[in-house]
Amino acid sequence: MEKLGRVWLITVILCFAVPFLACAGSTKDITVSAAISLKNAFEEIGQLYESKYGTKCLFNFGASGDLFKQIAGGAPVDVFASAAQKDMDDADKQGLIVAGTRADFASNSVVLIVPAGRKTSLKSFEGLRIAEIKKIAVGNPKTVPAGRYAEEIFNSFQILASLKDKLIYAENVRQVLDYVVRGEVDAGVVYATDAAVRSKDIKIIATAPEASHKPVLYPIAVIKGAKSEADARAFIALVLSSEGKKILQKHGFK
Amino acid sequence: MEGSILFSVRLSLQVAAVSTALIVLAGIPVAYFLARKDFRGKELIDVLFTLPLVLPPTVTGYYLIILFGRNGFIGRVIYEWTGWSIMFTWYAAVLASFIVALPLMIKTTRAAIESVDRNLINASYTLGHSEFNTALKVILPLAKRGIVAGTVLSFARAMGEFGATLMLAGNLPGRTDTMPIAIYSLAGSGEWSQAHLMVMLMTAMSGVFLYIANRYTKRII
């Protein structure tokens, strides 16, 4: 019994002591919620931002749909950079973004990929109908922008209905890439920038024609209630500047 | 980069330790009441506490945002009073782990308390112990095995908590990226060698922890 009492005492002390030990220093900072496909490019821009303005740049990377839900729930976010217009439209409709701060800062193309080293007669999006292709990974159109683009592309080739049973839905575009790299699926639809990350492990079969889907434009905006609107605007200005463009281009964005 | 791995390891341990401590404090009384008392809506309360165990963690996370976000039912009140929001802080990771792992503690502890010999409990009352003393000196010590097992399971679950944490605490490198979230982030940005290192570290830590817990449990029981 002695022992149990002591365990309780230690427990109680731990509960109250640890939060104080872990107090973070409060320097000036902004929080940027960005689509995870932007991670490498944005971390570089963030460093540039910190060296330029001396304001710390905190990132929150995730799926655009989840980032929107967090912002709608009142997450303390200053800047939102989404991989699709839809999530930014949703934020706009709910009055969450500062009017006049929204801008498109990058574009991307959508490609059809297969595992590297796999013998395939697949040559185009239309070719996906052939019997040899049994599983095609795409993002879940409900939450993953890349999945919605894939659906639009299939629609424009009028093959969506015939592919229904072959589609494997992933919860983000990098999961699609992973399925293809591991050879779990016969083909997948991802952004050109994702394909570039694992260029050795996959083969690009085709790039979707621009007319086959809505343009892949990445919007960015200041969120209402930002800690410092000026700092948030400065971050967006940096992304849109020629220096920012250069970094984005280095990571495959257009 | 080693620094950020070390940070994630420390944060994961810290989050798991604090949430497990809270789970022990909250879980034992709740389990005791569910096991020993009869009241209307008892099973409903049990269901409510168990739900996070079976719901997809992102759903639990979504509920937590609705409750504790700056615009949430509870979060709004806290924000209006203090100007502080739990979202995107490591406390949010503690809260998410607490909610998701609590049912493991309640389930095992309740079962353990229910299996304590009634004669011993009645004897304690007959000998003049109050209910509180009986609980503390007879029931809980006899249910120790279940309580320890529940604590170990809760800690392990808290260490591995991902979905609800990602929703409520976000994925802020250097702030809220616990090991599972850092792994998601590294895999998401194609940094595979770092991701592999972290995956192996996570597996090894969980394995070692469970091994030590098993040995320790055997010794004290």
Image (cartoon, coloured by chain):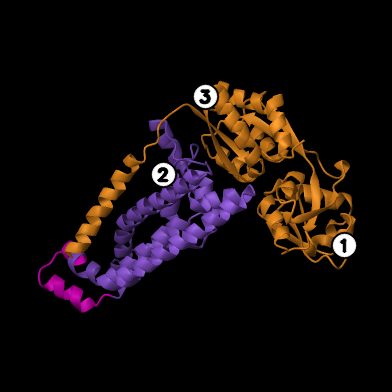
Chain colours: A orange, B purple
Q: Label 2 sits on what residue type?
A: Tyr
Tell which circle, 3 or 1, labels the residue nearer the N-terminal end. 3
Q: Quadrant of residue A169?
A: bottom right
Q: CA distance from mark 1 to mark 2?
A: 50 Å
User: Which residue appears at 35% of the width and 71% of the height?
Assistant: B111
Give yes or no for residue B140 being in the magenta stretch: no
Whether residue A198 is situated above or below residue B105 in the rendered picture: above
Q: Label 3 sits on what residue type?
A: Gly
Where is mark 3, residue-wise?
A54
Q: Overall secondary structure of the magenta stretch?
A: helix
**Bounds of the magenta span?**
B116-135
Give the total number of marks visible in the rendering: 3
Element assignment for label 3: loop
**Whole-percent x, y for residue B166 in the image:** 53, 48
Label 2: how many Cα within 10 Å (few below 14, some 14–19, many 20+) = some
Image mark 1: chain: A
Are discs 3 and 1 located on one and the same chain? yes
